[in-house]
C-alpha cells in the first residue's frame, strides 16, 4: 500500500476498526482462559469459552489484533495529515470501543483479582498480607490467575479503597463489578483525551487524540482489560496542565492521587515538587505548600485502608513472574550467552533487575530535573516526564501493555513526529505482549506464527509512517483539504 492510501476512505477505516475490535472480543472469549481458571458465564452467557477449537480462535484473535493495530496507524495518518478532524477521530474511537463494553476482561485476568481484593477489604482482611486464596475454591477464587492467588495486592491505598467500594456496591459479583470499573476506565480515558486536546498544539490535536482514544492499548487493554493504570494516565496530563497554569495545589493533588493509586505516580510527585522549586517567586514557601498538599493527600489515602503503607512491601509482587521480553531479561540473556552458561540464568536475572533499576532511577531523575526548568515549553516538559514514565516501565522486572498508560497522554500531546512514530511502534509491540493462552505455548505450535505476525505488523507500520513522511507537504495538505468536510460530517 502506498502512502497516499490513508486519504482514501475515512469511513471505511472506522467501520473496519469496529469489525476488528469485535473480532478480537469474540475470538479471545472463545479461545478461553489459561488452564486452572474458571470464568463466570457473563451477561447472557457471552463470556463462555468454546468447547473445542480454541487454538484456532486464538489465532484469529491475534490476526484481529494485528488488523486493529494497522487500522490505528491508518487513522493516525488520516488525523496527522488533517484528512479527518478531532470529531471524526472521537467517533472512530467510540465505534472501536463499543464492542468491548459488555465483554469479559480482555487478555487479562487482573480484574478478577480486583474483585477478590475488594472483597477482602470489605470483610476487614488486609489485602497487603494475604491473597485471594483465603476464599478457597469457589466463585471468588476460581477466575483469579493461579500465579496471583497467594500473592498480596501491590496497589496503592487509593486503588484498594476504590476496589473495596466497587466490591461493596456490586456485592463482589463479577459482571457488575467489571462493568462498573469499565465505566470508570472510560471516564478516565475521556478525561485524559480532553486534557491531551488542550495540551497539544492546535494543528496536532487530531493526531494526538487518535494516539490516545483510538490506541489499541487503550481500547483492548485499558478499557477492555479493565486496568487501574488508566487512572494514572488520566491524572498525568492534569498535572502538566496545572503546572503550566501554576495551579500548584491542583498539580500536587493530582500527582499525590496518582502516587496513592500506583507507584508510577511518584514520578509525577517529583516533577511537581521540582518544577515548583525552580520557580523563583516564594521558592521555599511555595515548595513547602506543595509538599504539604502532597503529604496530606498521601497520608489521607493511607488512612482509608488497614495497614495503609503495607503496599510498599508488596511492590515486588509483579516481579514474581519471569517474562522473557523485558529489558532485564534481555540483559540477563546476553550475560548468560557471554558466560556460556557458567552462571545460572536466575542469578543473572536478579543482577540484571538490580542494574536496570539503578540505571532507570538515574535516567528518570535526569529527565524529571530537565522537565522542571521554568523556561521549558510545556510540550517538551510533558515529553520528558512521559519519557521518565516509559523508562520506569522498561526498567521494571515485568512490563505489560497497560503500563504504557502511565506515559501515553503526555507523549501523545508533546512528542514530535519522530516521537509519535516511536510511540505507535511501542503501542503495537506491547499489544502483542498479552495474548490468548494457546499462542504463548510452544506445544500448540502457534508461538512462531504469533512472532511472525508481530514482526510483519511492525514492519508494515514503520514503512507506512516513513513513506508518509517522505510525501511532499503540499500533497498532504491538498489531500487534507479535499477530505476534511467529508470526515467532519461522517
Image (tube, rainbow, N blue to C red):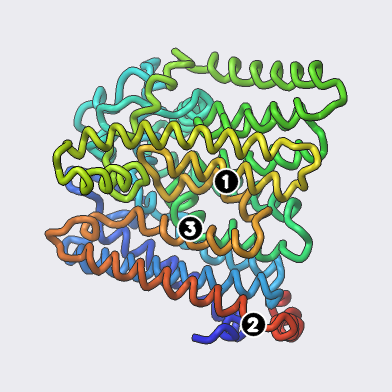
Residue beneath the point at 49% across and 51% down: 223
Classify 10 Å Cα crowding around label 1: few (below 14), some (14-19), many (20 and above). Answer: many
Classify 10 Å Cα crowding around label 2: few (below 14), some (14-19), many (20 and above). Answer: few
What distance separates the C-alpha of mark 1 from that of mark 2?
29 Å
The image shows residue 329 at horizontal and vertical percentages of 30, 44
Q: Nearer the viewer, mark 3 or mark 1?
A: 1
Classify 10 Å Cα crowding around label 3: few (below 14), some (14-19), many (20 and above). Answer: many
Give above or below for 383 relative to 62.
Answer: above
Q: Nearer the viewer, mark 2 or mark 3?
A: 2
Q: What residue is shown with label 2? A: 471
Secondary element at tag 3: helix
Contact flag, marks 2 and 3 (Cβ < 8 Å): no
Q: Quadrant of residue 385?
A: top right
Q: Specify the label residue 296 is tagged with.
A: none
Determine if residue 135 is in view.
yes
Could you tell whether 306 is left or right of 249 in the image?
left
Residue beneath the point at 49% across and 71% down: 462
Residue beneath the point at 50% across and 28% down: 165
Secondary element at tag 2: loop
Residue beneath the point at 48% across and 32% down: 166
Q: Nearer the viewer, residue 44 or 467?
A: 467
Please identify the quadrant where the C terminus is shown: bottom right
Q: Quadrant of residue 317?
A: top left
What distance separates the C-alpha of mark 3 from that of mark 1?
14 Å
- Determine the residue located farthest toward the left in the rendered image: 443
Secondary element at tag 1: helix
Q: What residue is shown with label 3? A: 427
Which comes before the other along the chain, label 2 or label 3?
Answer: 3
Q: What residue is shown with label 1? A: 387
- Determine the residue located farthest toward the right in the rendered image: 281
Amino acid at each position: 500500500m502506498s502512502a497516499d492510501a490513508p486519504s482514501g476512505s475515512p469511513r471505511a477505516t472506522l467501520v473496519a476498526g469496529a469489525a476488528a475490535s469485535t473480532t478480537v472480543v469474540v475470538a479471545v472469549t472463545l479461545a478461553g482462559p489459561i488452564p486452572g481458571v474458571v470464568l463466570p458465564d457473563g451477561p447472557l452467557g457471552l463470556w463462555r469459552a468454546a468447547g473445542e477449537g480454541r487454538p484456532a480462535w486464538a489465532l484469529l484473535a491475534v490476526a484481529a489484533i494485528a488488523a486493529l493495530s494497522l487500522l490505528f496507524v491508518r487513522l493516525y495518518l488520516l488525523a496527522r495529515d488533517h484528512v479527518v478532524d478531532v470529531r471524526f477521530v472521537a467517533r472512530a474511537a467510540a465505534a472501536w470501543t463499543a464492542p468491548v463494553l459488555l465483554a469479559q476482561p480482555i487478555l487479562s485476568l487482573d480484574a478478577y483479582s480486583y474483585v477478590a481484593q475488594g472483597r477482602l477489604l470489605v470483610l476487614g482482611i488486609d489485602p497487603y498480607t494475604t491473597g485471594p486464596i483465603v476464599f478457597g475454591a469457589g466463585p471468588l477464587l476460581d477466575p483469579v490467575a493461579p500465579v496471583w492467588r497467594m500473592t498480596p495486592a501491590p496497589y496503592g491505598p487509593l486503588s484498594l479503597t476504590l476496589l473495596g467500594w466497587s466490591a461493596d456496591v456490586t456485592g463482589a459479583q463479577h459482571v457488575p463489578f467489571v462493568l462498573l470499573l469499565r465505566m470508570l476506565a472510560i471516564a478516565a480515558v475521556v478525561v485524559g483525551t480532553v486534557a491531551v486536546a488542550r495540551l497539544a498544539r492546535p494543528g496536532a490535536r487530531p493526531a494526538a487524540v487518535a494516539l490516545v482514544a483510538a490506541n489499541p492499548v487503550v481500547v483492548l487493554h485499558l478499557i477492555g482489560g479493565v486496568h487501574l493504570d488508566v487512572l494514572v494516565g488520566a491524572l498525568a496530563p492534569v498535572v502538566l496542565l496545572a503546572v503550566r497554569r501554576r495551579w500548584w495545589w491542583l498539580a500536587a493533588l493530582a500527582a499525590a492521587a496518582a502516587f496513592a493509586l500506583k507507584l508510577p505516580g511518584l514520578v509525577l510527585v517529583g516533577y511537581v515538587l521540582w518544577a515548583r522549586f525552580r520557580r523563583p517567586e516564594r521558592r521555599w514557601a511555595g515548595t513547602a505548600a506543595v509538599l504539604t498538599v502532597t503529604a496530606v493527600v498521601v497520608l489521607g489515602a493511607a488512612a482509608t485502608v488497614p495497614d495503609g503503607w503495607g503496599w510498599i512491601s508488596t511492590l515486588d509482587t509483579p516481579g514474581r513472574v519471569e517474562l522473557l521480553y523485558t529489558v532485564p531479561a534481555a540483559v540477563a540473556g546476553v550475560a548468560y550467552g557471554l558466560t556460556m552458561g557458567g552462571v545460572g540464568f536466575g542469578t543473572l536475572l536478579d543482577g540484571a533487575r538490580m542494574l536496570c533499576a539503578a540505571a532507570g532511577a538515574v535516567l528518570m531523575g535526569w529527565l524529571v530535573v530537565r522537565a522542571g526548568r521554568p523556561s521549558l515549553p510545556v510540550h517538551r516538559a510533558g515529553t520528558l516526564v512521559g519519557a521518565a514514565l516509559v523508562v520506569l516501565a522498561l526498567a521494571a522486572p515485568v512490563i505489560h501493555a497497560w503500563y504504557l498508560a502511565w506515559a501515553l497522554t503526555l507523549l501523545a500531546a508533546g512528542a514530535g513526529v519522530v516521537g509519535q512514530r516511536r510511540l505507535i511502534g511501542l503501542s503495537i509491540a506491547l499489544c502483542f505482549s498479552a495474548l490468548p493462552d494457546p499462542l504463548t505455548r510452544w506445544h500448540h505450535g502457534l508461538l512462531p506464527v504469533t512472532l511472525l505476525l508481530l514482526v510483519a505488523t511492525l514492519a508494515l507500520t514503520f514503512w507506512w509512517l516513513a513513506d508518509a513522511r517522505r510525501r511532499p507537504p503540499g500533497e498532504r495538505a491538498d489531500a487534507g483539504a479535499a477530505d476534511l468536510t467529508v470526515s467532519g460530517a461522517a
